[in-house]
Amino acid sequence: MTDTRTVFKHVDYDLSGLLHYIEIGDIGLPDIQRPFVWPATKVRDLFDSMYRGFPVGYLLFWQNAGVKGARPIGVGPKTHSVPSLLIVDGQQRLTSLYAVLRGKPVIDQNYHETRIEIAFRPRDAKFEVADAAIRKDPEFIPDISTIWSSGKGSYKFIEKFLANLSSKRELSEEERDANSENLDRLFDLQKYPFTALEVAATVDEEAVADIFVRINSEGVKLNQADFILTLMSVFWEEGRVDLERFSRAAKNPPQPAQTPSPYNPYIKPAPDQMLRVSVGLGFHRARLQHVYNLLRGKDLDTGVVAAERREAQFAVLERAQDHALNLQNWAEFLKTLLSAGYRSGSMITSETALLYAYTLFLIGKHEYGVEPFSLRNIMARWFFMTSLTARYSASPETMMEGDLARLRDIKKKEDFIALLDHIMNDTFTDDYWSITLPNNLATSSARTPSLFAYYAALNLLDAHALFSKVKIPDLLSPTMQAHKSAVERHHLFPKAYLTKQGITGTINTNQIANFALMEWFDNIAVSDAPPAEYFPKFATRFSPEDLKRMHYWHALPKGWEHMDYFDFLSARRKLIADVIRDGFALI
């Protein structure tokens, strides 16, 4: 006979019962779950589905057998200090429902206490995220938490709502009935049925982590990084905490200001992003699916899982993560972005390119011992190249996997530098600069890699803004904050002027080659004047030598102000490509 024993049982709950167990602390979170709550829009949609009677998924609980590190849901003291049930799957649904029905603050993705306010319009049973307008609208209940948290029955609440609405406008009997019926239905959501599967207390943490991963791998909830983070919760909880602590600190300026911190103007990395750096450094892998099995202790050839192998692989990850989260390493790498001409996060079109560059920076430093000066220079050039060419935009893991594979035969620091230079030389051919790049510049996209590479080149060339003696690196600094942007993108051929010439549509008027960086007051002064009119006036500010440099920096063809618009665009794209090439040569 086949053994059909299972490690779980089927249990039915209603919502009010679940919330009671959360409130007293009888349901909590294991370390494989993070105390994050959904964004308010998703909570709104959850309530809408429940109100309509739609199913919203089952819950997976684990009977607690003294698991270390179990945490309560929400904030504040609980009656039970040790939960008897730990929620493994469905945590965000349950936390969101608890936050709204009990009016309790919860921990958001930035680790801050927050309230979720969902509004409801009884007239047509519409749910919304509360905002200032909704809070003033008598048709809405701005925070449905008050329906249940007041402790009053539905009758008194409905009467009070209708009385307030009647004072604003006259209600027909039909409207009163519809409002009352919809509010009664909302009040009864506390009886909404849930099905839970409860895993036995005899199942250990490793097996529960495996169950969690298997369940979520059937859908699109988790990615491979999440699977590894789950394993870390079980076998190296401190490592996962360190990742989350680093990411949390990177989001806000340190207090006091001089405290060492990962905060920076380029990126606010999530834990899974920093995990990818550690994995790239430790295992020379960009694809995480194999790393997950390695960390489980699985032999990829035989399929056998061994604790000793798992411990050895986690030791590799731990060493790599120590380097990846080292604040000195992080700060030194970010200087390479400055060396590449990139001044702030607004110029970064690919966080993946940034993180992969950090991975190679760490490999160069810790595996090949490249000295700081040479390492900064080669990695600044590498980041410029990968950003400009969007090297990691399509199939990024595959591309990075290939780049890491090229390191397998590299033994010396000189060979590491030579390899990266070889890849860059193969990419930046004469045809790339004269044909490919000008073609890439033929776009109206406001955030294209070639545009920000041009700005980076202007920074490297220490260029001045158009018609200005103020340097672009200063104007693009993230410390420059005012009501008006320090520097603005100016239409060299103003849109209104082009319209009079019969040239319309943003795809034509907002071409990259029609923009130049100008101080805001000059941009206003130009207004809608044609270039042949405004350029000679501004040119009087400068000497012939200054004008020559300005034409070069801003890629202005000779006599551009009198050119046909489309001829101007074609000529300027080639000159922009030349400026980018010159900027790269300075790194």
Image: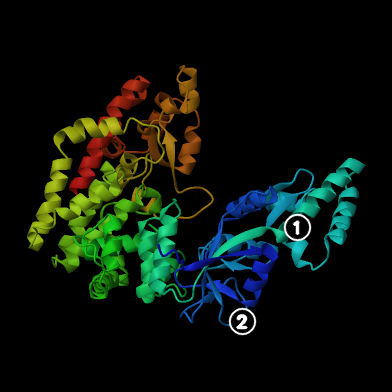
Left or right: where 254 falls relative to 171: left
Choose between 156 and 546: the one closer to the eye: 156
Question: Tag 1 or tag 2, which sits nearer the N-term?
Answer: 2
Residue at position x 12%, y 56% in the image: 417
* Quarter assignment of residue 301: bottom left
Q: Residue at x 31, y 54 (%)?
A: 354
Q: In the displayed structure, would residue 487 be above or below residue 211?
A: above
Does residue 435 show up? yes
| Mark 1: secondary structure | helix
- Quadrant occupied by the N terminus: bottom left
Residue at the extreme top of the image, as rendered: 502
Task: Name the quadrant containing residue 365.
Answer: bottom left
Assign a secondary structure to mark 2.
Answer: loop
Q: Which residue is mark 1?
A: 188
Position above or below: 361 against 576 = below
The percent coordinates of residue 3 (x first, y second) are 41, 65
Please name whichever residue, 122 or 186, is drawn nearer the observer in this view of the structure: 186
Q: Decide if residue 249 is on the left or right side of residue 48.
A: left
Q: Residues within 10 Å of mark 2 (few under 14, many from 20)?
A: some
Q: Is residue 264 visible?
A: no
Q: Which mark is residue 80?
A: 2
Between 166 and 482, which is closer to the camera in this rendering?
A: 166
Residue 344 horizontal side relative to residue 413, left or right: right
* Residue most extreme to the front: 1
Q: Residue at x 46, y 68 (%)?
A: 7
Image point (33%, 26%), residue name: 569
Picture coordinates of residue 115, whole percent (x, y): 64, 64
Residue 299: give x, y in percent of width and height. Answer: 21, 64
